[in-house]
Amino acid sequence: MEYYPQDGVRWINENFNKDEDLIIKKTFYLTNQDMIPTDDSPDGDSMEFLIGELENDYYKIYKRVLAADNDILFHKSIDIRIKHFIVNSNISVLLKFERLAGQQIIIGGDKENAVAENIFNDIINSFPSRTEQNHYVNSRVTNVLSQYLDGVKDSGKAFERYLERRNKIGNLNTLSSIRNYEYEKYLFILAALKKMLADSENFSEKDWQNQIIEIILIIYPKYIKCFSEVAIKDYYTNPSKPTTRSLDLMLIDANGTVDVIEIKKPFNNCVVTKRTYRDNYTPMKELSGTVMQVEKYLFHLNKWGAQGEQVLNQKYQHDIPSGMRIKITNPKGLIILGRNDNLCDEQLFDFEIIKRKYSNVMDIITYDDLINRLENILQKFKNDCT
């Protein structure tokens, strides 16, 4: 590292002669032993220091130079710049990384736990500038002062205008990389679902449910867990001796609230009838029976109430995040069954009416609805990239 102090290097040599260390930008901690001897005069413009070495395809930056707990590793392919060490004039970014991560920081290459170079650069570029920091401080101070003094300038609006400009022209590489990943993820899910639908006869009901629930947990990110074969109590059929019912699948959302999901294999002609009854296409037995089944599950869950919550929390306490409590709070249902790609417009219209009839307690979705949803998500990502 070559250092160009504004006032020359004489004062550095004088400090070293007095066994005083050199601290640069609150980031580099250097001693006389780190200095690389040169033939230049002691009154030159710059001074060179040895801060690391190349070892096994990585530049190892000595931990004592950065006052770190571990050596910092940069892959040899990285063009190391000062911005990789210091941001906003005096923030030691690598030291901050290490303290937050609690482990050695490795940038680039294929070592375990290495941070990809593009991700590292995205993080560096996302640091707030000194201008943004000043706007933020001014906004907070004037927000307090304006409660006691009249005529205080509204710095909050200036901060908002700055953020709007920054967001329009700022670096969005981090969001772009995430967006590209999301696109590939949903593209893979769509291909997997179409392949499953083409080969659905070779799946058992149980295997089909297990595969579809994985897709549902991705498409519906509000849900974090799904439990199968959940035993719930039926206090209504025989109040004096409640029976036990088995709930096929129970979803848990990020707040711990339970919902019911029923997944059927994608049989054709199981949604609405082919013939009309008084000019209406009515639900097929598969659909109406599943709706009734889910309604009963919801009914018994609500009746179970606080006692049910206690039982479920005790049973699944090791399967949910620490501190979360399972809650039965007006649960809703989700039904996935059948295909609607072979329905005429009139059938689709009546099917939509049927779905909306139950929309306050459950969502009814066909596999073609799932495909459309995935295709719309993919189209959204395409539009965002253009």
Image: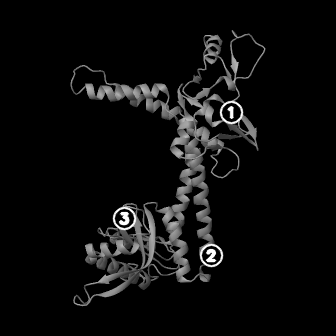
Q: Secondary structure at mark 1?
A: loop
Quarter of image, res 9:
top right
Mark 3 belongs to which amino acid? Gly
Q: Secondary structure at mark 3?
A: loop
**CA separation in Å, label 1 and label 2:** 51 Å
Q: Which residue is mark 3?
A: 256
Name which residue lies at 58% across and 37% down. 68
Spot occupied by residue 232 in the image (x, y as percentages of width and height): 34, 81
Foreground label between 1 and 2? 1
Pointer 2 local density, CA inside 10 Å: few below 14, some 14–19, many at least 20? few
Q: Which residue is mark 2?
A: 198
Quarter of image, res 46:
top right
Closer to the chain start, of discs 1 and 2, is 1
Depth check, front residue: 299 or 268: 299
Q: Which residue is mark 1?
A: 80
Position of the N terminus by quadrant: top right
Left or right: residue 153 versus residue 69 is left
Mark 2 belongs to which amino acid? Ala
